[in-house]
Amino acid sequence: MKILFAASEAVPFVKSGGLADVIGSLPVALRELGADVRIILPKYEDIPAEYKNQMRTIRTITVSLGWRNQYCGIQQMDWNGIPCYFIDNEFYFRRKGLYGYGDDAERYIFFCRAVLEALPHLDFRPDVLHSHDWQTGLIPYMLRNNYMEHGFYQGIRTVYTIHNLRYQGRFSRELMMDLIGVGNEAFVIADDGLEFFGDGNCMKAALSYTDKITTVSKTYADEIQTEYFGENLDGVLRKRSGDLTGIVNGIDNDLFDPMNDFNIVEPFRNSLPKKRKNKLALQERLGLPVNEAVPMIGIVSRLVEQKGLDLIQHVLDEILAMNMQLVVLGTGEWKYEHLFQDVAYWHKDKVSAHITFHDGLARQIYAASDLFLMPSQFEPCGLGQLIALRYRSVPIVRETGGLKDTVKPFDDATGEGTGFTFANYNAHDMLFTIQKAVRLYDDNDAWGKLIKNISKTEFGWEQSAKQYMQLYKSLVSPAAVKVEAAAEA
């Protein structure tokens, strides 16, 4: 089974969000199941020199983009046993950061075209071309419409993963016609292809033309077929519901391991006394009262509306009235940054806010906190709650997307469950759930059961990788495999 991942970011090369973690981890898990899996990315300026120095150019080609003929270098290096290819074009990718430029449409349409043009020059032909999010959304569209008549491409199947439906790559019709090299005929069918309320939409093109669609949790797969969560693509997704699968993301258990994390003061697995030594150390570092008996609530998040921070803002006074400490780490919208900075200034004995991103401090918060708060409006999968479980920090989450799939509500009567949940997007529902969690912290027997339940959870990539392998195998027929084997011979 030969699989090529096409994406716009991947750990350890460049990262802006959870997509990079997936692309950096899932291929490794697939390789362990026997797949020949490889990655292709843009060659960004921000890729560290230690990796750039390992890249070698295997071919240079010209890629047509509308009326333009652009240089494209194909470079390769191996990382962690995974062959990685990089599309080199300094005009498009030699600039700081990944996204947010005025010509992002041109940059990523070029990347999609370059990936397909590069395929015959690589050292393998993929059975499955797996693209991710809007930046690679035109790959299935272009493959179906522009390349299938060429023998090399026949039989290549496509999978497309939605990591966040909100970001779709929507651009003007005129711009996309120019860059893709199509006419008005490509926009005449409203429920198929590129057309989207008079504009063009890269993600919609992928949803219409890919063989299979996945997203990053089962509940999110159901949610995005509804009008409330569907971001105006729910009709397309309902139409393709038979080809849509939700597979929850995993985490790299070696990367997130409280037994081998040099950022924390006391390694631990399931020992609460050892975990609480990390809390005492973080309290001292942040200037909070050093007290093991006070439950610490952690928030490590982008500070944006999606994360449910308006719920916290609405009942912040009631939260501060509890016997607890709140530690916040993240950046985002100014109003939320200011909210936490302000409350930390006036409540130094209860709140510590850090408006930055610092991986070491994030890990210390996971290791130190007793509770981890994620009251998201929507959450396709969520990474924070998985890391929290790994570091035995009990999640408090809203029942949406991957949060619902990975955190089971604790039942006082049966002693079952792995966290605290609330269903409605309501500030007081969240508040009552936080209050219940803080009360339970004082019940040593119940808390011990909760931590024991969490210790039995497993959210590494192994199970998710097996589901992806089943999906890939369902696409590649035995006949196609025989044809490819004969061609290689």
Image (cartoon, grey):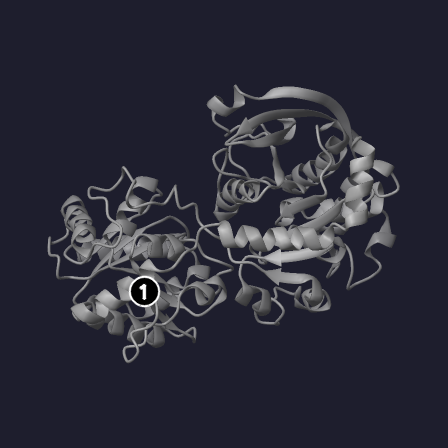
Q: Where is residue 6 in the image (x, y as percent from the top left)?
A: 64, 41
Residue sticking out furthest to the bottom:
413
On the rendered image, what quadrant is the N terminus found in?
Answer: top right
Q: In which quarter of the image is residue 382?
A: bottom left
**The disc labelled 1 sits on which kind of residue?**
Asn
Q: What residue is rendered at 35% in x and 76% in y?
A: 429
Residue 440 appears in the figure: yes
Q: Position of residue 112 (x, y in %)?
A: 70, 40
Residue 322 appears in the figure: no
Is 202 situated above or below 188?
A: above
Q: What residue is rendered at 16% in x and 49% in y?
A: 277
Q: Position of residue 483 (x, y in %)?
A: 82, 41
| In-image side of 139 versus 287 (left or right) | right
Is 58 situated above or below 224?
A: above
Q: In which quarter of the image is residue 349?
A: bottom left
Is 437 situated above or below 28?
A: below
Mark 1 lies on residue: 453
Q: Where is residue 114 in the image (x, y as percent from the top left)?
A: 72, 34
| In-image side of 375 versus 40 (left or right) | left
Q: Give SS at disc 1.
A: helix
Q: What residue is rendered at 68% in x and 48% in y?
A: 137
Q: Out of 157 and 235, give the one closest to the viewer.
A: 157
Judge the density around disc 1: few (<14), some (14-19), many (≥20) Cα neighbours within 10 Å: some
Is 347 situated above or below 362?
A: below
Q: Out of 419 and 327, give the one closest to the viewer.
A: 419
Number of labelled discs? 1
On the rendered image, what quadrant is the C terminus found in?
Answer: top right
Q: What residue is rendered at 19% in x and 62% in y?
A: 295
